[in-house]
Amino acid sequence: MSLHLVPVTYREAAEFCDQWHRHHRRPVGHKFSTGVANEADVLVGVAMVGRPVARHYDDGLTLEVNRTVTDGSKNANSMLYGAAARAAFALGYR
């Protein structure tokens, strides 16, 4: 099974989170989200990236992966974390 990154809106990511996450609700907001889809272009995971939850780290240069959710597809979570980190660095976050 091959996976690829896809753009997702907050609404799409939040709905996926509501459907698949076992015990946490969707985050209130985010800076950006990214998704992973399978070869049939079916969304199998999302990452929601936003401001840090802890005030001490909310310095304007730091982002936090607030939620990752997958349907259990192999390597989807790793792909999401890697994509989130690359995107944050590309946007100028440290």
Image (cartoon, rainbow, N blue to C red):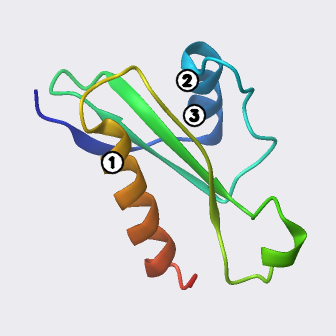
- Which of the 4 image quarters holds residue 51? bottom right
Q: What residue type is labelled 2?
A: Phe
Tell me the SS state at disc 2: helix
Give the residue drawn at x 78%, y 76%.
57
Q: Which of marks 1 and 2 is in front?
A: 1
Q: Nearer the viewer, mark 1 or mark 3?
A: 1
Residue neighbourhood size for the residue with mark 3, other residues' Cα within 10 Å, grouped as few (<14), some (14–19), many (≥20) = many
Q: Which of 31 and 76 is in front in this view?
A: 76
Residue neighbourhood size for the residue with mark 2, other residues' Cα within 10 Å, grouped as few (<14), some (14–19), many (≥20) = many
- Residue that numbered label 1 is attached to: 78
Q: At which x and y percent is residue 93?
A: 58, 81
Q: Mark 2 and 3 residues: CB-CB less than 8 Å, in contact?
A: yes
Tell me the SS state at disc 1: helix
- Which of the 4 image quarters holds residue 72? top left
Q: Which numbered tag is attached to residue 16? A: 2
- Residue that numbered label 3 is attached to: 13
Give the residue drawn at x 76%, y 82%.
60
